[in-house]
Amino acid sequence: MEQMKKLLWGVLIGFFVAAFGGVILLCGAAWLASRPPRIPGGSVLVLNWQGPIPETPGFDIPFPMFDRWSAPTVRDHWETLRKAAADSRIRGIVLMPDGIQAGWAKLQELRNDTVSFRKSGKPVYAFLRSPGAREYYLASACDRVYLSSEDELDLKGMRIEMVYLKKTLDKLGIQAEFEHAGKYKSAPEIFTRSSMSPESREVMTSILDDMYGQLVSALAEARHKTPDQMRAIIDQGPFTAQQAAAAGLIDGLLYSDQVFGEMQKQLHLSETHKVAARDYKRVPAESLGLETGKQIALVVGEGDIVRGEPGDSASGQGEISAAAMTKLLRRVREDGGIKGAIIRIDSGGGDAFASDEIWREMDLLSKAKPVVISMSDLAASGGYYIAATGDPIVSYPATLTGSIGVFFGKVNLHGLYDKLGIEKDILARGRFAEIDSDYTPLSDDARRKLQVGLDAFYKSFVTKVAESRHRSYEQVAPLAEGRVWLGDQAKGNGLVDELGGLDRAIEMVKRRAGIPAREQVKLVSYPPKRPLLEELFGREDDWTDLPATAFLRRFHTKLWMRGGIMRMMPYSIEFR
């Protein structure tokens, strides 16, 4: 017995010593990671842009295995290039994009930031590894573009693929039932049709033509060709490395070490010091005379709009909780040190009532402080609704926006229950008590009842937009109908005010706040980076990173299954 006690005490002491040592190591690593790195003169910044580019900040951690949880945000990339342009120690940049997962609006931000960096007079070279259109589009902003001789360039145009699940749902015995207001608010056709409706085809054709035109125009200008010449070249893709060189799409066939050698020659350096972007991120902007002075809030809303729980303190990546978002907006409104706010929206909408709660707090903030709305990849339906405060709106040419409309949706699972041997008995009092039941279909009377409500919500939406854009209802109504527009189309229709990104938004909010154009400001992120312990022990959604659930998330299944009235773009668009 005495030996067992000693063994137990030994195990416990060993456990606590190991745990204490682990904490010390974590704290030490965090401390080292927080220290500004040493940047020698004659350095070349290496930008390995890859994977997702979120809007919502994650957290800093020195361990590579957690990189997927702390991907650099759009603001991080923007800030890195601004710092590098002002930093005399950084003599040039080698851009190495690979497997980027982002919409074209975000790509336009990064590309424009690269063009702005080049105004510093410092060279930017791009080295590509099996690039697609996204990577090549970014690289086209560089002084020179290189590819190794045995590689290929997968540039062949753009396409939109529409997925339809009706036949799958039919086999499962699931009936998706939707009513909508706005002829282009084609409800979620992915659940109710097996092919494109004429309305969807009209919108998708318009968007694809415009987006492809933007791509062709940018590449043609970068490679000193006419748009027609560039279209003819793209029609020959994809390309081997030799074909890409012959077509004038790249500047040479080199390996990565040779690219750095070319940079070293141009800069007349005896030695090249490579600085990784993740290390350079720790260089304080203040040390370079950037982001000092008056504070401007950068409030980010990213993902589907949901109601959330009253205790929510922050919205995570992929979801805008109304409860959390209103708290953030209220904090900004009540903080006397904040002189203005940029509201950064990346959302296709979601729950109608949650959208309205956020709009209310946005409107209160607008009345208290200068506000500018900055749209990212997506600001449609509920994402556009919350922007209807009357404040200036700036979007990218490729931002998907508009989709001014509403719909009601529910799923009827009676057929699936039958297949599973599940039966329900329903007792109801009230003519429409079963209107949202998952066991009964919508009756004709129920559909008429819903349509009356949807028409009222739709009229309110259009009215709110008309008031915020200082136009009449009759002027806005033709632009609504649930139709999705690209940013340049939306500007032409008066739904946004300016085309641009973060730089333009900062210029606009400074002007509205009475801050001189040349005066630096400090951007304060809302939500801030999350503590590591909260991320490690507070996450309940690790399952969402599984391939199957990531696929389902594309169809916003959480919102569809919940049902109800929604202000949401009726499809997800990804250009390939």
Image (cartoon, rainbow, N blue to C red):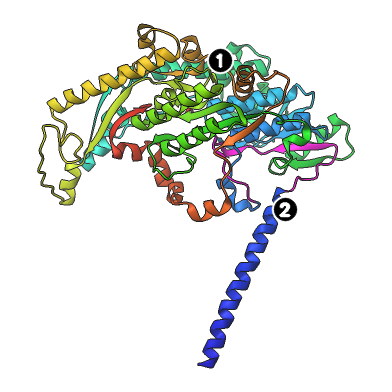
- Viewer-nearest residue: 268 or 401: 401
Label disc, if present, on residue 498 of the rendered structure: 1
Taking the spot 15% from the left edge, 51% from the top edge, the residue there is: 421
Crowding at mark 1 (Cα within 10 Å: few <14, some 14-19, many 20+): many
Badge 1 element: strand
Give the x, y percent position of residue 211: 51, 19
Taking the spot 55% from the left edge, 23% from the top edge, the residue there is: 369
Give the x, y percent position of residue 490: 47, 14
Q: Is 40 a magenta residue?
A: yes
Determine whether 318 is above or below 296 in the image: below
Disc 2 and disc 1 in contact, CB within 8 angstroms:
no
- Which residue is identified by label 2? 32
Q: Is 534 a magenta residue?
A: no
Amino acid at the residue labelled 1? Glu
Determine whether 386 is above or below 546 in the image: above
Give the x, y percent position of residue 541: 44, 49
Q: In which quarter of the image is residue 207?
A: top left
Amino acid at the residue labelled 2? Leu
Left/right of residue 505 with respect to residue 462 in the rendered view: right
Magenta span: chief secondary structure: loop
The earlier-in-sequence mark between 2 and 1 is 2
Badge 2 element: helix
State the CA–CA distance, disc 2 to disc 1.
42 Å
Label disc, if present, on residue 408 of the rendered structure: none
Q: Quadrant of residue 175?
A: top left
Provide the residue span drawn in magenta: 35-61
Give the x, y percent position of residue 74: 60, 33
Q: Quadrant of residue 467?
A: top left
- Viewer-nearest residue: 434 or 233: 434
- Viewer-nearest residue: 282 or 368: 368
